[in-house]
Image (cartoon, helix red, strand yellow):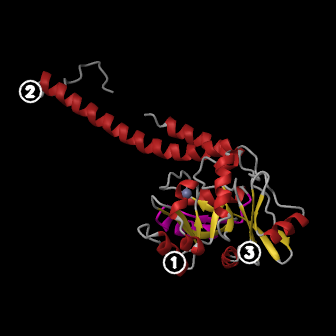
Amino acid sequence: MRNWVPVAALMVSVAAGTAADRPAPHVVRTMDRYEVLAADFHVHVFPFGWAFISPRETLLEAVHQGLDVVAITPHDQTWQADLARWVAPRLTRSPIVLKGEEITTPRFHVLAIGVDGTVSNQLALEDTLDTIHRRGGVAIAAHPYRVVWENYDAESMKKLDGSEVVRPEAQFDAAAATELREFNARAPLTAFGNSDYRGPTPMGFSRTYVFATARTAEAVMDALRARRTVVYDRDRAYGDHALIALADANGGLPRNIPAVPAPGWLRAIGRLGTLGALVALVLFNRWNNVAVTTAATTREDVQSASCPTTRPDPAPQPGQHSR
Ligand SMILES: [Zn+2]
């Protein structure tokens, strides 16, 4: 009945998606003995985590934004990251995909990057960090604002590998930016710029430049452990000082991101439209079924109330055409 609604949503979605389809050119940056890779290590995918974009669309968005590496970090689980890693080699262009998890507790949020298996969210912070390391991962404090500082004791700070020092919301909030910067300065931590991507906002708006010795997941993990990252906000640089100088000497790295300034809202309509069309199909189908059932019930009720005895249809009269 109302099938035009999902069909229209789908058409709008495809049109918007096509109009917005301007991927960033593939750039290979080499400096000294490093390949400099643009990365986002805090990415959520549909379903769960208030993320609206499927793993496949998320990887395409990463390509659009000129990212070489993404870590898929679902809350307290990792199967969506496995799914993304399965999808990646089936795309014509994909970033390197690292398996991740955002271990989410009332006291801390810690990103486990490159982990083998899922880490429980029931452990104390120190045990969480030990478990991440045992499973081959690196541990990053996610959005470590002042409210959680008291949970990061001296021992935990020693075991922590890195922290988010630039995030999208902090780029427009000087107080928030200061808190992230102060936390990162509390210990020798790898600097991360992450977007905490969920769909509507641009991925890689805050990004991490990784100085890797090769374009592989292993080389990226090695670089993170060796703190070979550089992160920029609008007017500062964070991370390894020698690498910041190396980047400056090589013409610098893009700071004012997203690299694709283009119509993010068109892509958002494109993706939300696809999702909306699916939801509408399910809802309208259900609604139609309900409507049909209700109509049928009502008709029977009326019939049984007004005509207690079933009468046969009147026979067509001569000269009448039955339709
Ligand atoms: Zn998150």
**Magenta stretch bounds:** 66-89
In space, the residues marked 2 and 3 are separated at their CA atoms by 81 Å
Residue at image mark 1: 130
- Whichever of labels 2 and 1 marks the residue nearer the N terminus, that label is 1
The residue nearer to you, when weighing 32 against 124, is 124
The spot of residue 160 in percent (x, y) is 59, 71
Neighbour class for label 3 at 10 Å: few (<14), some, many (≥20)? Answer: some
Under circle 1, the secondary element is helix
Q: Is residue 159 magenta?
A: no
Residue at image mark 2: 309
Question: To which quarter of the image does residue 213 belong?
Answer: bottom right
Q: Is residue 72 magenta?
A: yes
Amino acid marked by disc 1? Asp
Is residue 68 shown above or below 204?
below
Q: Is residue 40 visible?
A: no
- Whichever of labels 3 and 1 marks the residue nearer the N terminus, that label is 1
Residue at image mark 3: 215
Which residue is found at the position 52% from the left and 73% from the top? Answer: 129
